[in-house]
Amino acid sequence: MFVINDPPPQIAPARLALLLKAEPATIGHFRQVGFMDPAIRALLPDRRIAGTAVTIRFDGDDTAIVHYALGKLRPGDILVIDRAGDTRHACCGGGVAFAAREAGCLGVIIDGVATDIQELRAYGMPVWARGLSPITCKPRFIGGEFCVPISCGGVPVTPGDAVFADENGVLVLPPSDIETSAHRAIGMQDAEKAALARVTKGERFPDINGTNARISEILAAQQTAKP
């Protein structure tokens, strides 16, 4: 059975541009939820993307819904694929990646496997997946779901969510959290640059960030507490 919904409203480019000034790993300093399983890894290096989640879900080797999605993708979208536990059949290879890129899709996130790594590199299409497989899906037209709430890498993904990904991993954010998370992360990144500049001038990092002072306090308290 096929379930087809309309694509979600897109997140404004200015909000995504703000998010791109941060890093997923910086947001990971203060946020615990929304990060996909680290086994879903970037297949291409040096890529960072932020866009609007367009979701699909299907099991087995029927890739019909993937091909359908390629006709609905818009510039700024990120295709997020729930493979319902299948890690054998690759649902994204050279042809899918090329078509997605030409539609303006920023990247593909798969809770499953991809294929044609040489073509992915040649086309420069960012793909995150659990790995590679030479066994591919086929358009069998049995069924699939487009723009429904899914799970990807252990994280709930709703169509229209913000997806923020680089080599460190994939983060899913409700659009309402973009500004707060981005501004906090950017502030932390600026503070780290200032701290590292001080390290360059000879200061020790644990003195700058307070680690030494805090451990000294704990040691003093331990000494006071001894019988």
Image (tube, rainbow, N blue to C red):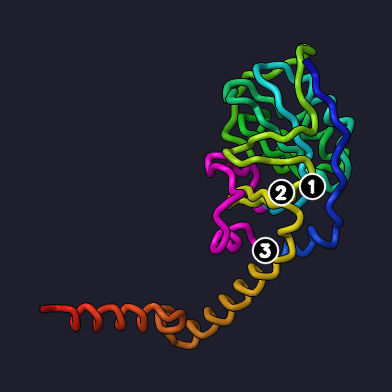
Kindly check if marks 1 and 3 are in contact, taking CB atoms under 8 A apart as contact. no
Q: Main secondary structure of the magenta part?
A: loop
Q: Amino acid at mark 1?
A: Thr
Q: Amino acid at mark 2?
A: Val
**Mark identifier at residue 181:** 3
**Mark identifier at residue 163:** 2
- Looking at the rendered structure, the secondary structure element under dot 3 is helix
Queried whether the magenta region covers residue 70, the answer comes back as no
* Quadrant of image for the N terminus: top right
Kindly check if marks 3 and 2 are in contact, taking CB atoms under 8 A apart as contact. no
Q: Which residue is rendered at x = 88% and y = 34% of the image?
A: 6
Queried whether the magenta region covers residue 33, the answer comes back as yes
Q: Quadrant of residue 148?
A: top right
Kindly check if marks 1 and 2 are in contact, taking CB atoms under 8 A apart as contact. yes
- Looking at the rendered structure, the secondary structure element under dot 1 is strand
Of mark 1 and mark 3, the one earlier in the sequence is 1
Q: Magenta stretch?
A: 23-46
